[in-house]
């Protein structure tokens, strides 16, 4: 499988602007600027936000597969991912997971969540360079 996205940038790093599109066109010419990346602007996106979305989505899907293999089906899996950028590099990805899974024990849930954290493709890609932490809550 191969997927792609495009980014286009015009001007300087601080005063320029760009746009990002994905192969599926779900993101199509979405703007990004210095202000959407390092400031408070909300009228676009930024690379770290996209990595956070990818990690949250990848983890949630992997957890679903791990749970199914263990004989469980989640009613809901909600994952928030916080990406930390410092000194010009992503230094941390923190997953906050809340799940509702009928019939599972806390111990089994923790085991499955740990497996998903360590083995989702985005975790594997990030894990060689950054710390990945997690809080997992079963409701």
Image (cartoon, rainbow, N blue to C red):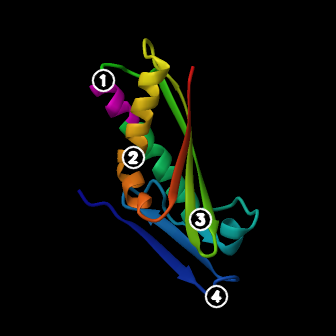
Q: Earlier in the sequence, mark 3 or mark 2?
A: 3
Please tell me whether mark 2 or mark 4 is closer to you in this view.
2
Determine if the magenta segment contains residue 118: no
Determine if the magenta segment contains residue 67: yes
Of all residues, the one furthest to the front in this rendering is: 107
Magenta segment: 63-69
Give the main secondary structure, helix, strand or loop, of the magenta stretch: helix
Whether residue 36 sits left or right of residue 53 in the image: it is: right
Q: Quadrant of residue 86?
A: bottom right
Which of the labelled discs sits on residue 12, or is there none?
4
Please tell me whether mark 3 or mark 1 is closer to you in this view.
1
The image quadrant where one finds the N terminus is: bottom left
Residue annotated with mark 3:
46
Q: Earlier in the sequence, mark 3 or mark 1?
A: 3
Q: CA distance from mark 3 to mark 1?
A: 36 Å
Q: Is residue 61 visible?
A: no
């Amino acid at each position: 499988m191969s997927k792609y996205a495009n980014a286009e940038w015009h001007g300087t790093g601080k005063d320029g602007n760009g746009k990002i599109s994905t192969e599926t066109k779900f993101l199509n010419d979405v703007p990004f600027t210095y202000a959407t990346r390092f400031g408070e602007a909300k009228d676009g996106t930024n690379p770290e936000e996209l990595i956070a979305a990818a990690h949250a989505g990848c983890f949630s899907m992997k957890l679903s597969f791990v749970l199914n293999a263990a004989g469980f089906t989640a009613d809901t899996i909600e994952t928030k991912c916080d990406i930390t950028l410092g000194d010009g590099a992503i230094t941390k990805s923190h997953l906050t997971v809340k799940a509702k899974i009928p019939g599972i024990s806390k111990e089994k849930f923790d085991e499955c969540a740990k497996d998903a954290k360590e083995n989702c493709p985005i975790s594997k890609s990030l894990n060689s360079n950054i710390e990945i932490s997690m809080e997992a809550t079963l409701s």
